[in-house]
Image (cartoon, grey):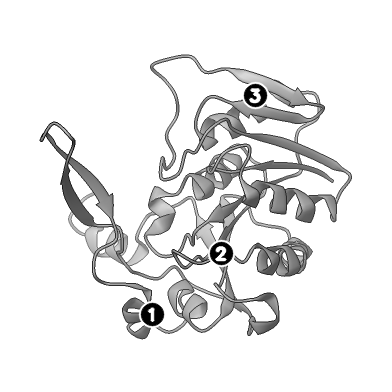
Amino acid sequence: MRILITNDDGINATGLKTLESIARGISDDVWIIAPDHDQSAVSHSLTLRMPFRITEISEKKYSVSGTPTDCVLAAIRSIMTDNLPDLVLSGINYGANIAEDVTYSGTVAAALEATILGIPAIALSLTINPGHPAKWSTAEHWGPEVVKRVLDLPIPEKVLINVNFPDVMHQSVEGIRLTRQGQRKCFDHIYKREDPRGIPYYWIGPGDLRYATIIKCAEPGTDVEAIGQKYISVTPLSLDMTHGKTFEQLKGLFS
């Protein structure tokens, strides 16, 4: 199996090194193509109004001066055209990508781009507690099992798999749950500050509603609930975002 790994935290991120370790436990043909700097929360953006550069760091390892989507597109349309990857792994992201996070996440977007281009893809993220060390060993310990179990059943076309690891040591993980995408909104607060010249600037960050409160209100069966209960969350996401029930209701209004 030929595996392409990428991320949105950048080519030097610890999570990418952790994911490389997982990938090399599955295959000896691993390619790394990732942004040359942090591209968190860029979602599914493409670099269209300026060129980007691809730099070969070593054999099968490249950095791209663009977004995670650029990285996957560059891999499949330029760098690996002679022998395309069989699987794309994106991550491991520094921070969970659950609920609405998936719409902002560059990590999920890289897997999304691979799926659009017909390559099976899995996005992987690690829940963190700000101010405390990230538990990368949890992702490294459980990652191979999760990926192998997902691959036991071929990932359907137009579907990507979103995996999130809880913020606990690997021996404290309760298990693996198949989940639905939940709801929670954290990064919706605007912080106003002033620079040394008294000119205001603004920073988006988490509001007062933190994980502990959100998880208590999580709907059963969701990724939010699973993470709160110390489970690994595995969520299949579809490219087709059509809402079936509303579509049926609107049939009588539009022909």
- Identify which amino acid the numbered label 3 is placed on: Arg
Label 1 near label 3: C-beta < 8 Å? no
Residue at label 3? 77
Q: Is residue 215 left or right of residue 29?
A: left
Residue 201: numbered disc: none
Q: Nearer the viewer, residue 39 or 97?
A: 39
Task: Say if 173 sits above or below 162 in the image.
Answer: below
Q: Residue furthest front?
A: 196
Cα–Cα span, label 1 and label 2: 21 Å
Residue at label 1? 215
- Residue at image position (45%, 80%) is 225
Q: Quadrant of residue 174?
A: bottom right
Mark 3 Cα-neighbour bin, 10 Å: few <14, some 14–19, many ≥20 = few
Which of discs 1 and 2 lies nearer the camera? The answer is 2
Label 2 residue SS: loop
Q: Is residue 136 left or right of residue 199?
A: right
Label 1 residue SS: helix
Mark 1 Cα-neighbour bin, 10 Å: few <14, some 14–19, many ≥20 = some
Label 3 residue SS: helix
Residue 79 horizontal/vertical position (percent): 71, 23
